[in-house]
Image (cartoon, grey):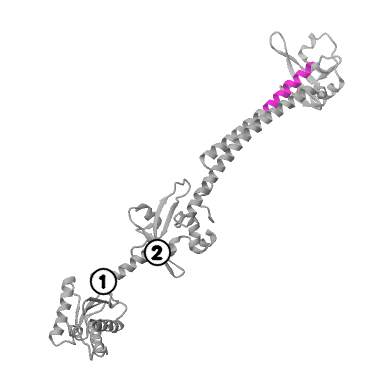
């Protein structure tokens, strides 16, 4: 299949899986960060108790009178109570500013020291100062760090394991969908019917039979010339056209599924016939229709052949009485609708029974065929020539007034009179001509031309009479 008719789309289950994966991944990342942060804080807080720690104690200036020792250092609004404080700590505090450390409510790292600040309160719960703990990062216990790293590795493994399971489920689900898509694609490509997807504007997709029929490699080749397959429709009674009752042909078929629908296509000077079925696709994004075209060319041609045989005279090859009856009704209706003239010519062979009795029916058949051939060559393409029985013939002349019809009839009579058909010395015909009038129906129209023919025979044959 050059352009797969079933394209992989995000199903609802896939969307749910992807959403679940995103949520789990986010939670896993958040949990890891939270765990690392808290583990570090707990680990380092513990180390403050066991390793070299410097504690800077600050008192508010308003409590100066209550201090019993000399004050060694002063920072902004606080007094330093410590006596043996490492000078490096004093330098750090001066450099950064005491407020940076006083306002520290969480663990902070500054120039290789882990610091945390705790408020000092009196018996009434009022804040009287702060003590700031400084711990050198080099004093952290390696074993505890390694244990912490192991914990992180275990957490990471668990997260990766969960993600792996989710990815495996997604892969299996995608593989299942892909296998189903291929399965249905093979089914569609194995059928001889042409299947197309259309959005009512152009062909969106098609199966293998489509590309084989048009002898193209891909859909783009088709779309360069045609947007819609309806561009190839031959408009003819009984077959679909591009629009029916102001509806797109595909939508019309979908809305009228109880009717048999056929199309006639001309491709590379060859005519094809297809039966048409249309179904609407359940698609939330676009209005899409599946069109199935079944090739009925052979059936249609056979039916047309049968129809042609049913209205064709076997001996002469022109229309028979059935053909005459079908067309005389149509032409009368058309002439009355459009106010155009319609003439009818009727003739038969004079003394034809004597020809059969004298020379036999084989010669009689030859005479009928030769007369038919001669008359046919004198008629227009629009004239309808029929043999209605025995030696009796009818000519329907649309859009022809009676004067012109009588001139044609006279020409025919003269030509037959001069026709040489061995072993006959001569053959003649008697002709009646009439024109349709408003009051006519089929019976009165035919009755009048029959009376005109009888008049020719009554007056001596081999002549034209007009009524």
Task: Please tell me how crowded label 2 is: few (under 14), some (14-19), or many (20+) other residues with Cα within 10 Å.
Answer: some
Residue 466 placement: quadrant: bottom left
Residue 316 placement: quadrant: bottom left
Residue at image mark 2: 297
Task: Please tell me how crowded label 1 is: few (under 14), some (14-19), or many (20+) other residues with Cα within 10 Å.
Answer: many
- Label 1 element class: helix
Residue occupying the far left of the picture: 458
**Above or below, comparing residue 387 to residue 169 in the picture:** below
Question: Contact (CB < 8 A) between labels 1 and 2?
Answer: no
**What number is the disc on residue 310?**
none
Counting from the top left corner in percent of width and height, residue 264 is at 39, 64
Q: Is residue 299 left or right of residue 55?
A: left
The region drawn magenta spans 33-49
Counting from the top left corner in percent of width and height, residue 139 is at 82, 22
Total labels: the figure holds 2
Which quadrant, please, contains the C terminus? bottom left
Is 347 part of what is drawn in magenta? Answer: no
Residue at image mark 1: 323
């Amino acid at each position: 299949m050059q352009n797969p008719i079933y394209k992989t789309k995000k199903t609802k289950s896939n969307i749910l899986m992807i959403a679940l994966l995103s949520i789990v991944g986010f939670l896993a990342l958040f949990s890891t960060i939270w765990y690392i942060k808290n583990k570090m804080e707990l680990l380092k807080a513990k180390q403050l108790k066991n390793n070299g720690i410097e504690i800077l104690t600050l008192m508010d200036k308003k409590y100066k009178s209550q201090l019993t020792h000399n004050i060694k250092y002063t920072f902004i609004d606080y007094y330093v109570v410590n006596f043996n404080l490492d000078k490096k700590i004093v330098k750090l505090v001066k450099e950064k500013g005491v407020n940076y450390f006083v306002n520290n409510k969480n663990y902070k790292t500054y120039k290789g020291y882990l610091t945390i600040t705790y408020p000092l309160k009196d018996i009434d719960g009022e804040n009287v100062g702060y003590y700031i703990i400084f711990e050198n990062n080099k004093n952290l216990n390696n074993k505890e760090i390694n244990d912490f790293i192991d914990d992180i590795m275990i957490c990471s493994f668990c997260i990766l394991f969960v993600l792996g399971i989710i990815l495996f489920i997604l892969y299996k689900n995608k593989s299942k969908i892909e296998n189903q898509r291929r399965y249905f694609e093979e089914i569609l490509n194995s059928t001889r019917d042409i299947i197309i997807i259309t959005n009512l504007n152009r062909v969106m997709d098609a199966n293998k039979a489509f590309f084989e029929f048009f002898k193209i490699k891909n859909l783009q080749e088709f779309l360069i010339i045609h947007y819609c397959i309806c561009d190839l429709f031959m408009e003819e009674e009984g077959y679909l056209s591009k629009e029916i009752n102001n509806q797109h042909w595909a939508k019309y078929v979908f809305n009228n599924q109880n009717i048999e629908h056929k199309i006639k296509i001309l491709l590379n000077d060859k005519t094809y016939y297809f039966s048409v079925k249309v179904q609407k696709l359940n698609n939330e994004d676009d209005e899409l229709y599946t069109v199935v075209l079944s090739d009925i060319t052979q059936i249609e041609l056979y039916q047309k052949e049968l129809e042609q045989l049913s209205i064709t005279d076997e001996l002469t090859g022109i229309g028979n009485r059935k053909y005459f009856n079908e067309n005389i009704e149509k032409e009368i209706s058309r002439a009355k609708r459009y106010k155009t003239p319609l003439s009818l010519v009727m003739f038969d062979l004079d003394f034809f029974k004597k020809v059969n009795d004298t020379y036999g029916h084989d010669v009689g058949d030859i005479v009928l065929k030769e007369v038919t051939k001669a008359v046919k060559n004198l008629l227009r393409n629009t004239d309808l020539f029929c043999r209605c029985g025995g030696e009796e013939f009818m000519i329907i002349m649309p859009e022809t007034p009676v004067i012109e019809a009588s001139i044609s009839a006279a020409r025919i009579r003269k030509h037959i009179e001069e026709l040489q058909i061995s072993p006959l010395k001569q053959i003649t015909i008697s002709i009646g001509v009439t024109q349709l009038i408003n009051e006519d129906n089929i019976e009165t129209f035919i009755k009048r031309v029959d009376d005109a023919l009888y008049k020719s025979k009554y007056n001596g044959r081999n002549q034209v009479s007009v009524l």
